[in-house]
Amino acid sequence: SQQGEEDPQALSIQEGENATMNCSYKTSINNLQWYRQNSGRGLVHLILIRSNEREKHSGRLRVTLDTSKKSSSLLITASRAADTASYFCATVPSEGSSYKLIFGSGTRLLVRP
Amino acid sequence: ETGVTQSPTHLIKTRGQQVTLRCSSQSGHNTVSWYQQALGQGPQFIFQYYREEENGRGNFPPRFSGLQFPNYSSELNVNALELDDSALYLCASSLWDRETQYFGPGTRLLVL
């Protein structure tokens, strides 16, 4: 079963606008990661935020984490057509020995030129 | 590009057959994980291999099995294929002490 749920399921914006995606999860985590997937192919790692961090930046990406609400958000600023993809959050549970990723159901982002 | 390769890229099988998917991990990575992604869904963890031993398994039946070789490449075997096994199969490699996983392009399996 999926750990997290992304919201919204789909998002359509104009190039240059900001895109915000949210992720909620259920159990305690070691870290939370965001991945991008183009056209149903392999996933590209975007950013990792640890459970003791609240905010992280990477280029045009900003990720926040609220462990009390078990939620995270991904902000893409000044979006480009090339940002069109599906975005997934994935958590690494704090329990257990394997670094398995538990993915949400994803947000499909369309950036219109 | 992550340096993780998978073969084949596409595969068509019939129900009841067996399939083997292959993955070469990124240089230096000793951990390989396999995921199944159904259409429109997020990937689901199948299992992980570390130094040739299974190191965790998701909610998949025993007909899903795997191997990791001394060079850290890996195989995913699925016996007695069912229609619901149609999916994109992704492998990911990582260093044991790092959490970031690097994904290959996937193998798309269609079971008829």
Image (cartoon, helix red, strand yellow):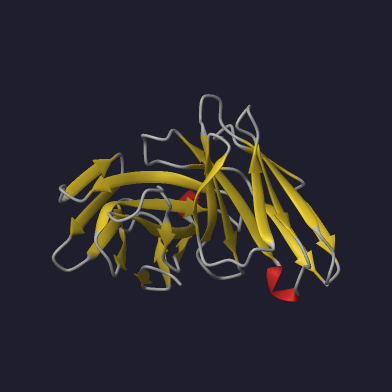
Q: Would residue B101 appear left or right of A75 to someone viewing this image? A: right
Q: Residue at x 65, y 59 (%)?
A: B88
Image location of residue B29, percent across then percent down? 51, 30
Q: Would residue B11 appear left or right of B96 to someone viewing this image? A: right
Image position of B97 with respect to B112: above or below? above
Image position of A93 with respect to A27: above or below? above
Q: Residue at x 27, y 54 (%)?
A: A94
Q: Which quadrant of the figure contains the C terminus of chain B? A: bottom right
Q: Residue at x 58, y 66 (%)?
A: B60
- Say if residue A98 shows up in the picture: yes
Q: Residue at x 43, y 58 (%)?
A: A87
Q: Which quadrant of the figure contains the N terminus of chain B? A: top right
Q: Choose between B21 and B67: the one closer to the eye.
A: B67
Image position of A85 with respect to B102: above or below? below
Q: Choose between A38 and B56: the one closer to the eye.
A: B56
Image quarter of residue A6: bottom left
Q: Would residue B51 appear left or right of A19 to someone viewing this image? A: right
Image location of residue A59, percent across then percent down? 30, 39
Image location of residue B104, percent across then percent down? 60, 43
Image quarter of residue B53: top right
Image location of residue B2, percent across then percent down? 54, 35
Q: Choose between B55 and A39: the one closer to the eye.
A: B55
Image mark count? 0
- Say if residue A112 shows up in the picture: no
